[in-house]
Image (cartoon, rainbow, N blue to C red):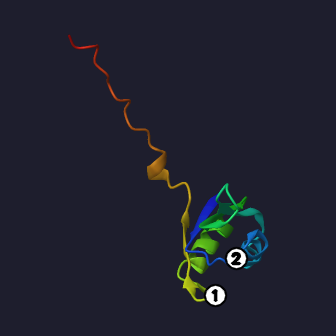
């Protein structure tokens, strides 16, 4: 299960995000989203857990946690409601 972590301070890198994640279980991976040019943090990242219980514990523990003066946000990166498909848009033929 993938956990979104937002409002990350610039001081947080992949290693530090992984260390934060370890408090709630064993993360499969922890990555900061970065700009292509320069590799600067976008201020959010993702933590992947194999065990959903650990992921939910991380969401509960990290959401609102103060790290380096900033309050983190944490939530399920793939909520069930977002996975529902929207109907394909119908297109009409050329008007003439």
Residue at figure coordinates x 64%, y 73% from the top left? 58
Instruction: Say whether marks 1 and 2 touch (CB < 8 Å).
Output: yes
Left or right side of 14 for 5: left
Residue 63 occupies quadrant: bottom right
User: How far is the residue under mark 1 from the one under mark 2?
Assistant: 9 Å
- Where residue 5 sits in the image (x, y, percent)? 59, 69
Residue 73 vertical placement versus 84 (above, below): below
User: Element at badge 2?
Assistant: loop
Residue 43 vertical placement versus 2 (above, below): below
Residue nearest the observer in this picture, 66 or 41: 41
Question: Tag on residue 15?
Answer: none
User: Element at badge 1?
Assistant: loop
Ranked by sequence position, the earlier of labels 1 and 2 is 2
Question: Tag on residue 68?
Answer: 1
- Where residue 85 sits in the image (x, y, percent)? 43, 38
Residue 3 occupies quadrant: bottom right
Residue ranking furthest to the top = 96
Residue with the mark numbered 2: 12
Residue ranking furthest to the front = 37
Give the position of the C terminus as an image quadrant. top left
Left or right side of 17 for 4: left
- Where residue 45 sits in the image (x, y, percent)? 64, 65
Mark 1 crowd level (few <14, some 14–19, many ≥20, 10 Å Cα): few
- Where residue 4 sits in the image (x, y, percent)? 59, 64
Give the position of the N terminus as an image quadrant. bottom right
Residue nearest the observer in this picture, 91 or 35: 35
Residue at figure coordinates x 65%, y 67% from the top left? 41
Residue at figure coordinates x 79%, y 72% from the top left? 15
Left or right side of 85 for 30: right
Residue at figure coordinates x 49%, y 46% from the top left? 83
Mark 2 crowd level (few <14, some 14–19, many ≥20, 10 Å Cα): some
């Amino acid at each position: 299960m993938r956990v979104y972590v937002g409002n990350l301070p610039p001081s947080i890198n992949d290693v530090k995000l992984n260390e934060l994640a370890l408090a709630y279980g064993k993360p499969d991976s922890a990555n900061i989203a970065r700009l292509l040019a320069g590799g600067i943090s976008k201020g959010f990242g993702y933590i992947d857990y194999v065990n959903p219980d650990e992921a939910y514990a991380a969401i509960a523990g990290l959401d609102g946690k103060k790290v380096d003066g900033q309050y983190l946000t944490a939530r399920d990166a793939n909520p069930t409601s977002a996975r529902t498909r929207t109907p394909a848009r119908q297109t009409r033929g050329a008007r003439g």
